[in-house]
Amino acid sequence: MTWLDRRRLLNATSLLALGASWYAVTAAGVIHPFLLPSPAEVAGEAWDLTRSGVIFRFAGISLLRVVGGFLIGAAVALPLGMLIGRLETVRDLCDPILELARPIPALALIPLAIAWFGIGESSKLFLISYAAFFPVVINVIAGFHAVDPAHVRAARSLRASEVQIFRDVVLMSAFPYVVAGLRIGMGMAFLVLVAAELIASNAGLGYLIQEARLNFNTSRIFVGIMAIGLLGYVLSKTLLELERRVVPWKYV
Amino acid sequence: MDGRPPGILIDDVRLTFPGPDGADVTVLGGISLDIEPSEFICLLGPSGCGKTTLLNCIAGFLQPSGGRILIAGAEVVGTPPEVGIVFQEHALFPWFTVRQNVEYGLRVQGVPRAERQRVAANFIELVGLRGFEHHYPHQLSGGMKQRVGIARTLVNGPSVLLMDEPFGALDALTRDALQEELLRMWERDRKTVVFVTHSIAEAVFLADRVIVMTPRPGTVRAGVKVGPRRLRSRTSDEFVAAYRAVEQALGREESLR
């Protein structure tokens, strides 16, 4: 048996064990089904939400919010990070603000977001883009800072012009950092999503679990949580795979 | 390459940096050197003696604070067109494949794709890396990377080759092999070469003339001519005699300290 097989087997074992203990605990009746519904109830709820299409619609809406907020955050972070990474003056100007703002969790901004943008889409986009902004900007700065002077000299000695050096050396050196920053930024955006949707909304996976709580439907809460986990998993795997493809010199 | 490669005239070159305590630090203390066309020079000296700094001045990366450097009679300002540089630790572009690295010098000059691929293929063949065109640098061994570095420099057809401890990071066997390959290439087109090293054996094996430098501030301690290359092997009497002469030049300096 190869290592990979062994690993897969162990992975599957732990998932099965988790499911089995969940079933055992609920079947024994030690925990009230309101607190922990049985796997069968949750599966039934999941089936209902799938058949009606609600889960897909809500997942789609959530995904749209994540991507929208992420794009806004990245659109600000990319040029800013490039300027900070390349120009010392800009760095000295922006550093204190960035350092002060960075430790503030997006969740602490919820009241402010509501005051500024109301309870509609814009406050959600604001929070998500805020969360996505920092990992992107920090990685872009690091990327443009990481240019190896030896590479610049090598290009110059091969008679590359300054424009060619920027395109072929500076941008290429920064590229893996930028891509990693975008991936992490997307992850942060996703983490803030549910909180943003709890503010007040009538659609999305965050709304689904909030509404389920108000209706004492614990099974639905479980389905919502699992859907969020699954979506996040697929998203991060997809982005990682994308990263491997666009930065072949790091992964081939 | 048309005609003979140029010689290099280094005339009383000095270089001082402002030091941390305000006092100037002199790195190069007046170096004069007349390098003949097609001569293979090795700059040898303890680390910190300024041999790489001198090379960077010849390459046009650094501006001397005094004296001048002439290549083909023209003062060096920026990298002169006839100069190619092989870097310490190869400095390959990790985001390009072997072929993209080698053809880069042609690409930036707008040489059409088909033509530059043909030329690059020749040089990849020359350094024995056929079949590795589509590998990225991190997939190659240290010796292969430096071979790519040499090919990348040769593609532009330089007549003066500046090499900054190019084999310093390689294991002894690979190093010997690359030294021999380098000499074979040199025998073919007899470029003017300035090669920086801190290995006596490497200097004596490669050079027509070994320039022994003093510790900082770097000056020329001695120039040791090595006999005809065709008689040379790593164990010949000539090799050993030259090795001793260089060692002596270095050792005398050390006893002065």
Image (cartoon, helix red, strand yellow):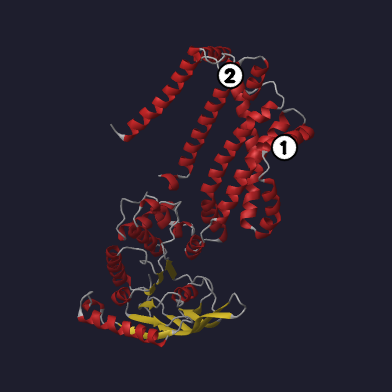
* Residue A192 shows up from this direction: yes
**SS class, disc 1:** helix
Q: Amino acid at mark 2?
A: Ile
Q: Residues within 10 Å of mark 2 (few under 14, many from 20)?
A: many
Q: Residue at x 42, y 53 (%)?
A: B100
* Residue holding disc 2: A55
Residue A20, located in which quarter of the rendered image?
top left
Q: So how many labels did they put on this image?
A: 2
Is B39 placed left or right of A124 in the picture?
left
Picture quadrant of residue A223: top right
Residue wearing tag 1:
A109
Task: Give x and y (percent) for residue B131.
Answer: 31, 50
Let me know if residue A72 appears in the view.
no
Q: Crowding near pointer 1: few (<14 within 10 Å), some, many (20+)?
A: some
Please, is residue B66 above or below residue A227 in the view? below
Q: Quadrant of the C terminus of chain A?
A: top left
Check contact, mark 2 vs mark 1: CB within 8 A.
no
Name the foreground residue: A243 vs A231: A231
